[in-house]
Image (spheres, grey):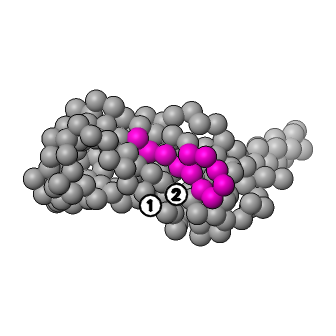
Amino acid sequence: MKNIWLMTAAVSAVVVSCGTVQSLVQNTFPYTANVLVSTGVPADKEVSSTSTATNVQTWFGGNNNAKIKDVRISDAKISVVSPSGGNLSAVKSVKVYVSSSGTGEKLVASRSNITTDSSSLNLDLNDTGYLDEVVKSSGLTVRTVYELKNQTTSDMNLKIALNFNSVPAK
């Protein structure tokens, strides 16, 4: 009977530790982009802003041999950084694209008909498939396309926060 309890405890410990290891090796890595919306930006016209990733590149360094796979977008959010107390009421829509050297642009997140006066908003994720090639290439670029309902009365700084998930490659 004692052996059965010891065996059960050992099997339980292995199962729990495998789950812990699995959660530890599933990486989530962030990328943030800042978008400046100037007071001169007209309403009802799509405007594009591009920024190059630095924090994602520190994870992989443009290394096509990085030991990760199955990279997907897991979360996307837009928020007002400034002015303090600002909100998204002037924003009509937003689309977020990713690309890198030698890859085509992929729409990863968007939101249309924004009707919130909140300072942040989760974006709808687009099923773009795996983004391994884009993330592992050098020069990851995020292009944000936005449209305003009306011109802003002061400059507005927006933050686009993207999270990517991956698993280790064998």
Q: Which residue extends farthest top?
A: 113
The 10 Å Cα crowd at callout 1, few under 14, some 14 to 19, many 20 or more, is some
Place of residue 16 in the rendered image (x, y in percent of width and height, measured from the top left): 71, 46
Q: Which residue extends farthest left?
A: 153
In the figure, residue 92 lies in which quadrant? top left
44 with respect to 5 (left or right)? left
At 79% from the left edge and 48% from the top edge, which residue is drawn?
A: 14
Q: Are marks 1 and 2 in contact (CB under 8 Å)?
A: yes
Q: Which residue is mark 2?
A: 141
Place of residue 108 in the rendered image (x, y in percent of width and height, measured from the top left): 51, 41
Q: Is residue 34 magenta?
A: no
At 44% from the left edge and 45% from the top edge, which residue is drawn?
A: 96
158 with respect to 149 (left or right)? right
At 29% from the left edge and 46% from the top edge, which residue is drawn?
A: 120
Place of residue 95 in the rendered image (x, y in percent of width and height, measured from the top left): 40, 41
Q: Closer to the camera, 120 or 17? A: 120
Amino acid marked by disc 2: Thr
Instruction: Using the numbered discs, state the Cα–Cα distance from disc 1 to disc 2 in whole angstroms.
Output: 6 Å
Secondary structure under tag 1 reads: strand
Q: Which residues are magenta?
A: 95-105
Q: Is residue 103 magenta?
A: yes
Place of residue 36 in the rendered image (x, y in percent of width and height, measured from the top left): 28, 59
Q: Which residue is mark 1?
A: 51
At 52% from the left edge and 68% from the top edge, which residue is drawn?
A: 54
100 with respect to 17 (left or right)? left
Upstream in sequence: badge 1 or badge 2: 1
Secondary structure under tag 2 reads: strand
Asked whether residue 122 is in view, the answer is no
Question: In the image, which disc is placed on residue 8?
Answer: none
Amino acid marked by disc 1: Ser
In the figure, residue 76 lies in which quadrant? top left
Q: Is residue 164 above or below residue 55?
A: above
